[in-house]
Each structure stands twice: as structure tokens, then as C-alpha cells.
Image (spheres, rainbow, N blue to C red):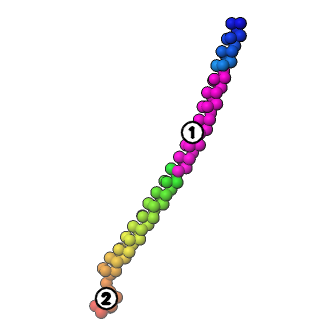
Amino acid sequence: MFHFSMLVVSGYRVEKVEEFIELQDKEMEEYVAERDNLIEEHGEKMTAMKRRHLEEELEMEKEYDARLASLMKKYTPNQAEGSANV
């Protein structure tokens, strides 16, 4: 009888361990799914930020080019003045 009760307790322990493992597996699957979503969301945010940065950089370059062209025009001698001085 003692031996039978030990088997029952042992079977109960095995059942509890199996339940624990199944719970851990389920939680791990949920963790992986949430982590994958987080990684994807972060990647999308990084891409959007880089796009905004490049657009801002492009606008700055356009402004620089326009101001440089204006400055060069200001200090370029007129063709009419150059031929009159010759």
C-alpha cells in the first residue's frame, strides 16, 4: 500500500511538472511573438526617422545651393561691364 501511494504522489508530481512545462512553452511563444512585434515596430520607427532626416538634409542642401548661387551671382562681374572696360 505504501508503494502504491508513492506512485500516486509521483504521478501527481509528473503531472504538475508537465503542466508547468506546457505553461512555460505557451508563455515563451507569447514572449517571442511580442518581441517580434516590438522589433518590427522599432524598425519601422527607425526607417521613418531616417526618412525624415534625409528629407531635412535635402532641404538644407537645396537652401545652401540657392544661397551659394545667389552669392556667386552677386560677385560675378557683369558681362556688359567687362567688355566696356577692355
Q: Amino acid at mark 1?
A: Tyr
- Which element type, helix, strand or loop, lies under badge 1? helix
Q: What residue is shown with label 1?
A: 31
On the image, the x and y values in percent for residue 38 come to 53, 46
The foreground one among 67 and 5 is 5
- Which element type, helix, strand or loop, lies under badge 2? helix
The quarter of the picture where residue 83 lies is: bottom left
Say if 83 sits above or below 5 in the image: below
- Residue 44 left/right relative to 73: right
The foreground one among 29 and 50 is 29
Q: Mark 1 packing: few (<14 Cα in 10 Å), some, or many (20+)?
A: few
> Can residue 86 be seen from the camera position used here?
no
Q: Residue at x 50, y 56 (%)?
A: 47
Q: Residue at x 37, y 76 (%)?
A: 69
> Can residue 60 be seen from the camera position used here?
yes
The foreground one among 63 and 86 is 63
Which of marks 1 and 2 precedes in the sequence? 1
Whole-Å distance between the Cαs marked 2 and 1?
76 Å
Say if 61 sits above or below 38 in the image: below
Could you say which disc has been placed on residue 17 in the image? none
Q: What residue is shown with label 2?
A: 82
On the image, the x and y values in percent for residue 1 come to 71, 6
Closer to the camera: disc 2 or disc 1?
A: 1
Q: Which residues are magenta?
A: 14-41
Q: Residue at x 64, y 27 (%)?
A: 19
Marks 2 and 1 in Cβ contact (< 8 Å): no
- The answer to if 20 sits in the magenta stretch is yes
On the image, the x and y values in percent for residue 21 come to 63, 28
The residue lying furthest to the left in this view is 85
- Magenta highlight: main SS: helix
- Residue 26 left/right relative to 77: right
- The answer to if 9 sits in the magenta stretch is no
